[in-house]
Image: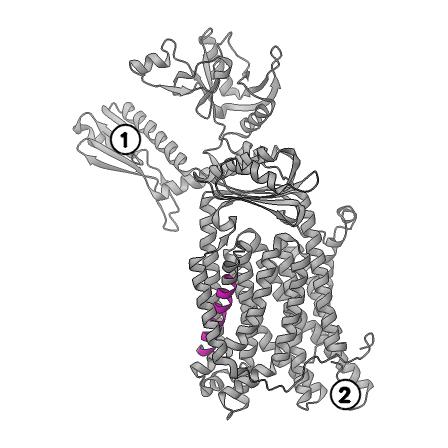
Amino acid sequence: MFLVPDFKGYDFFPHGTRLNFMKFKDVCFFASLALMAISLALIFTKGFNYGVDFKGGAMIEVRSTQGDADIAALRTKIGALGLGDVQIQSFGTPQDALIRIEEQPGGEQAQQDALKKVQGVLGDGFEQRRVEIVGPAVSSELRRTGTIAVLASIVAIMMYVWFRFEWQFAVGTLVALAHDVLVTAGIFSLFQMEFDLSIVAALLTILGYSVNDTVVVADRIRENLRKYKRMDLTELLNLSINETLSRTILTGVTTIVVLVALFFLGGAVIHNFTFAMLFGVLIGTYSSIFIGAPILEYLGVKRETVVGTEAKTAG
Amino acid sequence: MLHFERWKIIAIILTVLTGIMFALPNFVSKQTLAGWPDFLPKRQMPLGLDLQGGAHLLLSIDQEEIRKDWLQGVQDAARANLREAKIGFSGIGVDGGAVKVTLVKPEDAARAETELKKLISPVGNAVLGTAGTDLEVAKSGDNQFTIKPTPQGFDQRLTNATTASIETVNRRVNALGTAESTVVRQGKDRILVQFPGLSDTRQLKDLIGQTAKLSFHAVHPSLSPEEARATRIPLGYKIYASTDTERGGPAEYLLQETSIVPGDDLEDAQPGFDQRTTEPIISFRFNTSGARRFGKYTQDNVGRPFAIMLDDKVISAPVIREAILGGTGQISGNFSVETANNLAIQLRSGALPAKLTVVEERTVGPSLGADSIAAGMRAGIIGLGAALIMTVIAYGTFGVYAVIGLLVHGILILALMSAIGTTLTLPGIAGFVLTIAMAVDANVLIYERIREELRAGKTAIAAIDMGFQRAFVTILDSQLTTFVAALIMFWLGSGPIRGFAVTLSLGIITSVFAAVTITRLLAAMWLKNAKTSKSRTLQVPI
């Protein structure tokens, strides 16, 4: 056009690569299965470090109005209130402290009473930056809806893939998605990072991103199945992954750059959320190459059905 | 794929212009906005409580109290009906979630059944086929009846009580200030209060944490509570605890159960100070019927005490010195300035049908909100900038087109959120930043495809056409699946998740529009221009 002079972009990636991804498929596949198993075991034995959303209780973020927050003094003062398990940690800047109080026995009102006690101890030396209290009724509801949301998303996405592709693709997607969610959750369990509502949102987005990746590869596999009628399936899967590799990496890098910006600059409140996303994008990219595609080989995609039913839509 | 009809181009340009118009108010201050002509859109995207600071309280109504009150009312009505029909009964009481009536003579059963059935009223909607009754009357023995609420009837009670509570809570919350607070129903028995700008919720919780049912009762003329307990509590009387012990009053009172004047007859209440003792008091005024009843009672009972009760506890029991005929009076009840103030607000707003409990509270102070906005903006701008630079480096001139598409995506999402009035939350900002990555992905898919086609030896026109056409299917599939996840998040999520889901789903729509329309239009224009000006060997700047 007139305003923008013509200039070529810099093509980062060597094209026509024939990296043999399928060579590692067995190793990767079983490594992934093992990871899933380990994650499951971690979740069942170690459990999650649930945030107030799911565990109930109170979380109070305070900022000292005079100098740095004296965490040790806060610990003694609030510890003396007899509120059970109380965690106090520095948060973000040295002036800030985060106080977590476990769910108090005695129903909804007991949580409020605990907050009142803590507020009484804090006095004027602290400014309240954030208060989150979730009672027993709401926390159990959030646990339920959170689980349903993740499961429902996986099923809905699988149905969509089934509808648009073949059942083998749907199974591949299902395993890849389950893998991503499980391993991310496993990491949260392993390091006992706080698991709250925003992590569920992150898991759901990871699902979206991972299926995005899987679908792009699947799309190419379908196209190639039609194009190369006699190619060996393993070779064809390899070719499809290679052909979409430049896109996979470019998009992945862009997303990671954006997330890294959010992670380091977005503030402490969304730290865990962006961490989950970062990890999920990496694992999601891995799973679409090393799980989503190889499964098609294990299950054996029938060329005729793919070519027959999808010839029109993919034009 | 590369031919655009004239009307399509006009439609695209109009869409972008409309988007700019709706997005623009977000970049100017409220004062500037006020000076704009009326035909321009002026709506700014509202900021969520996590960004502007404020309180979010989820209240739950006490179901047991509603059931108890209802059964009490049913019992009173049943007693009155039987008395009026002169049917003798030996017992009536609330037992196991139902009212049980025992008649003296089994012969009266048929008549009693007719009388008791008068208490039943229909509920539900006959047209929708959900009609039913609120109570069930069943004969549970020769001379026994059970009156039981139906689930339907109780649901209706609960809904009505919640509705009434919302109005009362609204009035109480408004008394705290003129901020744009909202009070809305959530589910059958919950109320969500959102109060922007409020970071200390203590007074708010005090105000809505009390039912504030005020009533005036006659004190038994001769018996003390101890004497009554020792012998027999007279019919229609009951012992109530007092909170007025600090000023030397007794711990208990024997009071008539039926009030002289119910609290509903209160018209106004204001905090003030007693002129003699300077202690905080509340002065009140009755409406006409209340004033008449109160006047008559005080006239007839000069020299005797009466009790003022708040939520079934006596707060003071003054002696009537003279008839109070004007319908005004004052309550002194060991108040502090603050409690007198709160109680006056509560009395003015009316009583709550049942106690409300806070089941969820999320409060963000203004400083954290401001920090979050700053952090979100900084991360957003840097993330966006990095993504845009990468796109231009990777795809040259066509990369610039993609950037223009991305900017349109940004403008449109702002415009949509402002026009719909979706609140922007911190997770929402994260969602927005993420949609940028996804919008870049759409362009990457298209451009990588064009490169592939070029490498395969296709001409420039064919390659560009093919690129958009082939990639479109993939974009649609990949974005739709994310959209499915976003919809489920919106459907199931609460608060923070919803904000994220909304920006994500809107962002998917605008990013697809930007990639397949704006970028494609620009590419088509480049092609048209290049074809007329250059030679046959066309080089695509990608």
The image's mark for residue B115 is: 1
Q: In the image shown, does B497 or B301 lie closer to the viewer?
A: B497
| Chain that bears disc 1 | B
Dot 2 alpha-carbon crowd within 10 angstroms: few under 14, some 14 to 19, many 20 or more = few
Circle 2 residue: B538
Eye-nearest disc, 2 or 1: 2
Establish if A206 lies above or below B37. below
The image's mark for residue B17 is: none
Q: How far across and how far down the image is residue A226, in percent?
A: 52, 88
Q: Quadrant of the N terminus of chain B?
A: bottom right
Of the numbered discs 2 and 1, the one sitting upstream in the chain is 1
Residue at point 73%, 80% (across, down): B542
Across the whole image, how many numbered discs are drawn on residues?
Answer: 2
What is the spatial separation of the Cα atoms under label 2 and label 1, in whole angstroms? 96 Å
Establish if B476 lies above or below B114. below
Q: In the image shown, does B199 or B509 lie closer to the viewer?
A: B199
| Chain that bears disc 2 | B
Residue at point 65%, 84% (across, down): B466
| Rendered image quadrant of residue A16 | bottom right
**Most frequent secondary structure within the magenta stretch:** helix
Give the residue type that dot 1 points to: Glu
Colour setup of the view: one colour
Establish if B202 lies above or below B407. above
Q: Secondary structure at mark 1?
A: helix
Residues at marks 2 and 1 touching, judged by CB atoms closer than 8 Å: no
Give the residue type that dot 2 points to: Leu
Residue at point 43%, 63% (across, down): A41
Q: How far across and how far down the image is residue B336, in percent?
A: 58, 22
Q: Is residue A59 magenta?
A: no
Q: In the image shown, does A131 or A5 lie closer to the viewer?
A: A131
Q: Is residue B424 visible?
A: no
Magenta region: which residues? A168-185
